[in-house]
């Protein structure tokens, strides 16, 4: 199987990457709401990781995104979503995506 890479229609070069860590209520539709929020604003996510925690009642979602001028607005919009309990911002050095990448090597 060959995967073709296409050019990013909204290149975001020059911006550092950051990791957003979200704690959310775990039920159907939460991930869809979050992804739609980013899609409606044409804000690219480089990576998404989601895992249930607290016995399955909640989930943690990690988003690898570019730190551009709209990021603070995106964080405020995330915090307004009913099922988002907390949003934490980490630098790109946050290891969650590196650990996952190591798992696949």
Image (cartoon, rainbow, N blue to C red):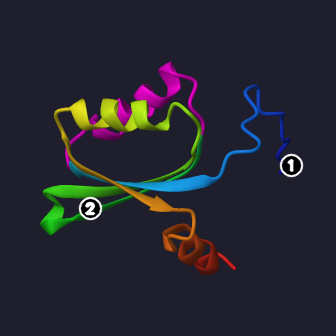
Farthest top residue in view:
40
Compared with 64, 100 (above or below) is below
Residue occupying image coordinates x 55% and y 77%: 99
Vertical arrangement, residue 18 with respect to residue 7, above or below: below
Q: Position of residue 105 (x, y in %)?
A: 70, 80
**Mark 1–mark 2 CB contact (< 8 Å):** no
Disc 1 to disc 2, C-alpha distance: 32 Å
Measured as percent of width and height from the top left, residue 70 is found at 51, 31
Quarter holding residue 78: top left
Label 1 vs 2, first from the N-terminus: 1
Report which residue position mark 2 lands on.
52
Q: Nearer the viewer, mark 1 or mark 2?
A: 2
Query: Taking 81 as reference, is 96 left or right?
Result: right
User: Which residue is at the front of the view, 52 or 82?
Assistant: 82
Disc on res. 2 = 1
Which residues make up the magenta segment?
25-44
Picture residue at 58% right of the left edge, 24% below the top: 42
Q: Quadrant of residue 100?
A: bottom right
Could you say where residue 73 lies in the image, as x and y percent from the top left? 41, 30
Could you tell me which secondary element the residue under label 2 belongs to?
strand
Residue drawn at the location 30% of the way across and 58% of the way down: 60
User: How many marks are shown on the rendered structure?
Assistant: 2
Q: Residues within 10 Å of mark 2 (few under 14, many from 20)?
A: some
Q: Where is residue 40 shown, x and y percent of the image? A: 49, 19
Q: Is residue 42 magenta?
A: yes
Please say if 81 is above or below 22.
above
Residue 92 among magenta residues:
no
Circle 1 Cα neighbour tier, 10 Å, few/some/many (<14 / 14–19 / ≥20): few
């Amino acid at each position: 199987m060959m995967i073709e890479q296409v050019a990013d229609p909204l290149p975001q070069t020059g911006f550092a990457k950051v990791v957003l860590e979200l704690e959310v209520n775990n039920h159907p539709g939460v991930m869809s709401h979050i992804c739609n929020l980013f899609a409606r604003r044409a804000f690219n996510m480089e990576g998404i990781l989601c895992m249930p925690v607290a016995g399955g009642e909640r989930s943690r979602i990690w988003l690898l995104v570019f730190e551009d001028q709209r990021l603070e607005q995106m964080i405020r919009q995330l915090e307004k979503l009913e099922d988002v309990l907390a949003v934490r911002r980490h630098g790109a050095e946050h290891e969650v995506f590196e650990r996952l990448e190591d798992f696949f090597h």
